[in-house]
Amino acid sequence: MASRKAFFQRPISRRAVLKQTGALTAGLGVPSLGGFSHLYFTRQALAAEHSPIGTYPTGSEGDTVCIGASVPRTGTYAVQGEDELKGFQLAVEHINNGDELIMKMAPKINKGVLGKQVKLVVADSAAKPNQAVQEQQRFINENKIVLMTGSTSSAVAVALNKFAQREKILYVTGISGSNDTTGKDCVRYGFRQNFYGETAANAIGPVMLKTFGKDKKAAFMTPDYTYGHTVTKSVNDYLGKNGGWQMVTNQVSPLGTQDFSQYLTNIANSGAEYLINVNWGRDAVLSIQQAKQFGIIPKMTLVVPYQIPFLAKETGPELTAGVLAATDFWWTLEDKYPLAKMFVAAFDKKYGYKPEWGAENAYMQFAIWARMVSEAGSFYPPDVIKQYEKGETFPSMVGDVHFRSADHQLVRPVVIVRGKKPSDMKNKEDYWEVLEVVPGEPLMQKPNDFGCNLGDYT
Amino acid sequence: MINWPLFVSQLFNGLVLGALLALISSGLTIIYGTLGVLNLAHGAMFMLGGYAGWLAYTYTNSFIIAVIAGSLFVMLVGVLMERVIIRHFYSRPHEDQLLVTFGLGIVFVETVRFFFGSLSKLVPAPPALVGITPLGFMFYPTYRLALLGIVVVALIILYLVLYRTRIGMIVRAGIEDSGMVDALGIDVYRVFMLVFGIGAMAAGFAGIINAPVVSIAPDVGEAILVQTFVVVVIGGVGSFPGAVLGGLIAGEIISLTSMFNPGYSYVMLFVAMTLVLVLRPYGLLGTAGRE
């Protein structure tokens, strides 16, 4: 039944493509009908050549395409996951109604992608890799999804990367800061918008050395999975090599730890001057609050290398005042980037608060995907991947950006922020001051430095 | 680097953590001992205590009122839960009891998330207990010291109720053989309701007094449930002294292991549980034959 329906719909959707492309050609003032029809028939011939792969062509035969999102809505990363989800939802809404903002990043979309409305199907991953993979498998079976997303833990991102490559379904990460995501565990079918932990370290490192000086002692707090280990290593390597800093202790805790007293006791006993906290989500909130209870803060200066959405809101600005952090996005960047201003306004209007970087990352990922599919003119995954790999520069909420073809990592700036004192806050969401926007390209290691091998297209 | 101050500090951490686990576990163990129902919503009770207390705190700014409100609210929830749902499950298989309490736990957690969101809430410690206290070998958060005292007092009260009152005698008799208690003309179901209420209150009380240490979120009880379950297994099902001993052992294992490698803290806890199950299947202070 479904396939019959799809069969009868196919000519209509092709006409829609024809109409759109025609309108676009006319709009661009290219009145060459011959050239256009040539393009059209070439595309038809190409489509005929494509053998089925992943959910292609079934997933894109109807008038709607589905995206599967497995985001944490419970557990340690629930707060950040919920924000991320809102970013995805806003992007889908904008794709479907052709909002001005998304058109700036993906100019060829027109009330949907290639004439098809986009539908988001969502499940709670609780930041657990197995759960996320099972959910996406269900979405593939039931919804024939054309794209997967969602991760607030790099463990999930890495698992979905591998799953994407195996199932030949495109995957754009949600939040994922591990060096492995587009490094050791990179795949042809996976793409990341937010930066490497290594890039964050290379951006915040110089600021730390300039602010705090050389030859200091640091205690690290690290969550026990890929993100934590790689970020801690990157930051420690940078500070050690360039500033002679010494790691006096590294307290590794499992995701979801609630009582950090044992770890903090070790840190209090370590003689460190700086507390570099790589924990994330609720783990970060609790470890920072408890470090304060133990008097470690303000005795030691806190640094958060990879910023955590809602951290200041949860701990209170008293605890984040003066704290240095590297982040993807902070809403006051609206003063610098017009697209950021549009995004913050649209998000605030819909959800009643300023978006954190999880939401911004999510929105960007979908906007970029919509751009790539509409530019490629096809949902055929290898075509879309090749479009990403062209590495074209396009506008975004943090200025012009482009993808690196060799590791599928977006080249984008890193934003260095410092926590504001409560007395300096201009409104209740004015937690961070943007110190620097550091261009990404010079901060990035070579694509294969972490052993990236993308794998096959088909 | 392991030195004496660090060792003593971790020993102390283990004591504080262990005391808290002992309190929560004693609630779980007396419910299981008496009613034969393993309450998988016990972690949610801990969470509810925190939220009820936090709500009371936001309206009154009084920590004491918050503690009273948190405890009483959870006791009420426990009593209602027993009257409305659990009592229908006494004669049903254990799997049904596990499922219904597990389900109730999810309902409680998600209801709280629906109304208050996932952002964590902090109940500040009373002003007199804020700050750090020098103990000679280390500086320790004053409130955590107070917490140890509060928990010890609560455990003593629970002990007195169980071992020095008539109702406590009935409860202990019920743990050994509830059928016989019933045969002696005591309304055992009323006792069950009371035990469920007290057991839940122990978790709720722990939930609110722990809130100034670990800020609350809807999932705060999830990890606690697993730990208290381990404590009950180590100490012996249905044994109040077992819960106290088990709690302290668990606290020390977690703390002392973390001195060498925090990653192995919970591994060692489960190793200890396995050893107990192999060598003394009824737990350290448990008795053979209890359900």
Image (tube, grey):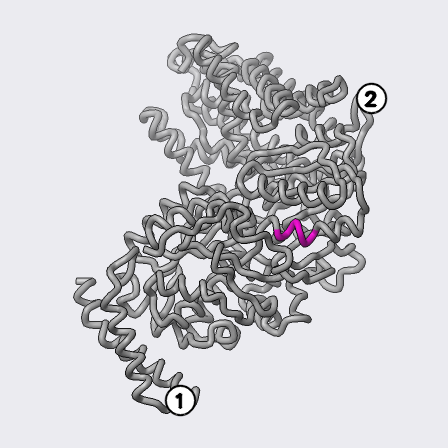
For residue B136, the mark is: 2
Quadrant of the image occupied by residue B98: top left
Against B12, residue B101 (above or below) is below
Q: Percent x, y for residue A123?
A: 41, 51
Query: Quarter-wise, where is residue B220 in the image?
Result: top right
**Residue drawn at x 30%, y 88% as measured from the top left:** A34
How far across and how far down the image is residue A7, in percent?
Answer: 19, 69
Position of the N terminus of chain B, as image quadrant, is top right
Which residue lies under the disc numbered 1? Answer: A30
Q: Is residue A337 left or right of residue B45?
A: right
Q: Pointer 2: residues within 10 angstroms few (<14), some, or many (20+)?
A: few
SS label for mark 2: loop
Residue type at mark 1 is Val
Q: Which residue sits at x=69%, y=22%?
A: B10
What segment carries the magenta color?
A199-204
Residue A162 rendering spot, x and y as whole percentages: 40, 46
Quick one: quadrant of the C terminus of chain B?
A: top left
In the image, A390 versus A94, the foreground residue is A390
Q: Which is nearer the eye, A142 or A207?
A: A207
Most common SS among magenta residues: helix
Residue shown at 50% from the left, 18% from the top: B271
| Disc 1 packing (10 Å; few <14; some 14–19; many ≥20) | few
In the image, is residue A258 above or below residue B121?
A: above
Q: Secondary structure at mark 1?
A: loop
Q: Is residue B115 visible?
A: no
Mark 1 — on which chain does it sit? A
> In the image, which disc is placed on residue A311?
none
The mark lying in front, picked from 1 and 2, is 1
Residue B182 relative to residue B203: left or right: left
The percent coordinates of residue B109 (x first, y second) are 49, 42
Residue in the foreground of this view, choosing between A118 and A439:
A439
The reply to whether residue A324 is in sight is yes
